[in-house]
Amino acid sequence: MAKHIGSFFERFKRLAVPDGATRDAVSAALKSVLGADVDRSHITMRGGIAHLSVSSVLKAEVQMKQQELLLRIREILAKEVVRGFR
């Protein structure tokens, strides 16, 4: 019985995180790490890359703190969904 339950739950490990949840996690990480309020409407996801529609100053800060931001997003989602920023 336990083996069947384990294989049942194994299917869910491969499910993708919904786009809205990913954008919310990116927004929360930006707030937590940089103190920047970025609405999820300014974040689009393509191929694991978070594209930000923000000022060039904020984009430079994001690049400098990229590793910390990615770690924070992984903590929020418990999955590696975002690989970088643009």
Image (spheres, helix red, strand yellow):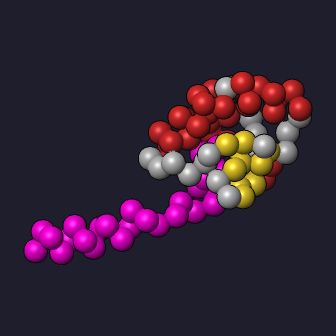
Q: Residue at x 53, y 34 (%)?
A: 71
User: Where 6 falls versus 82 (above or below)?
Assistant: below
Between 15 and 28, the one nearer to me in the picture: 15
Residue at the extreme right: 56
Quick check: is 8 in the magenta stretch? yes
Between 5 and 32, the one nearer to me in the picture: 5
User: Where 1 falls versus 46 (above or below)?
Assistant: below
> Is the N terminus in the top left, top right, bottom left or bottom right quadrant?
bottom left
Q: Is residue 44 left or right of residue 16?
A: right
Q: Is residue 70 left or right of residue 63?
A: left
User: Where 70 falls versus 34 (above or below)?
Assistant: below
Asked whether residue 40 appears in the rendered view, the answer is: no
The magenta segment is 1-26
Q: Where in the figure is residue 28, as x and y percent of width and height?
A: 62, 39
Between 34 and 39, the one nearer to me in the picture: 34
User: Where 55 falls versus 45 (above or below)?
Assistant: above
Q: Residue at x 50, y 42 (%)?
A: 74
Q: Where in the figure is residue 12, as x and y percent of width and height?
A: 38, 67
Q: Is residue 27 left or right of residue 70?
A: right
Q: Where in the figure is residue 35, as x and y percent of width and height?
A: 69, 26
Between 21 and 12, the one nearer to me in the picture: 12
> Is the C terminus in the top left, top right, bottom left or bottom right quadrant?
top right
Q: Residue at x 76, y 25 (%)?
A: 61
